[in-house]
Amino acid sequence: MSSVDLTQAMEALPELRPLLLRYIYTILVQAAPVSACNVRHPLTGRVARCLLMAHDRLEAPGLALTHEAIAKILGVRRASITVVLHELDQTGAIRVGPRQISILDRPKLESLTCYCYGVLKGAFQ
């Protein structure tokens, strides 16, 4: 969408501006903790955080995320994601299937994340 079209849409729909500003604020508030988390915390917690954040937004038990997509999000090798997903699968928190990751035990998966997930979840809500 062009900036001109966006400006016209915000003029035509006054309720759109505060909604978009809230969305931008949420993205900016989350950017710093995610960046810091990706540098400082173990990969298992970061993958768990990534899965939970996707689950929060999609509100579906199954996530159509590939190992490659998660690797790109977190800036690591795909092979490392495969190892971590296998470990998480063995805990019973998730099930890794063909082209889908299912969250089976959300509280268990939350316990495997670092504290950053709580901060990000609060900002999203």
Image (cartoon, rainbow, N blue to C red):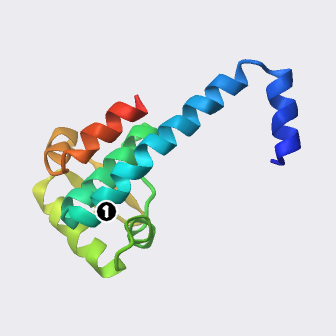
Which quarter of the figure has residue 115?
Answer: top left
Q: Position of residue 78 (x, y in %)?
A: 36, 78
Q: Nearer the viewer, residue 26 or 98?
A: 26
Quadrant where the image shows the C terminus: top left
Residue designated by label 1: 38
Q: Quadrant of residue 11?
A: top right
Position above or below: 7 against 90? above
Q: Report the side of 39 relative to 66 (left or right).
A: left
Q: Residue at x 42, y 34 (%)?
A: 124
Above or below: residue 125 compared with residue 46: above
Hey, what amino acid is under mark 1?
A: Asn
- The answer to whether residue 55 is seen in the rendering is yes
Q: Secondary structure at mark 1?
A: helix
Pinpoint residue 105: horizontal percent, then vertical percent: 19, 43
Q: Is residue 48 above or below residue 53?
A: below
Question: With 70 as the anchor, is 6 left or right in this view?
Answer: right
- In this picture, residue 81 sits left or right of residue 92: right
Q: Nearer the viewer, residue 96 or 19?
A: 19
Q: How many marks?
A: 1
Residue 73's spot in the image, x, y percent? 43, 64
Residue at x 23%, y 66% (from the top left corner): 43
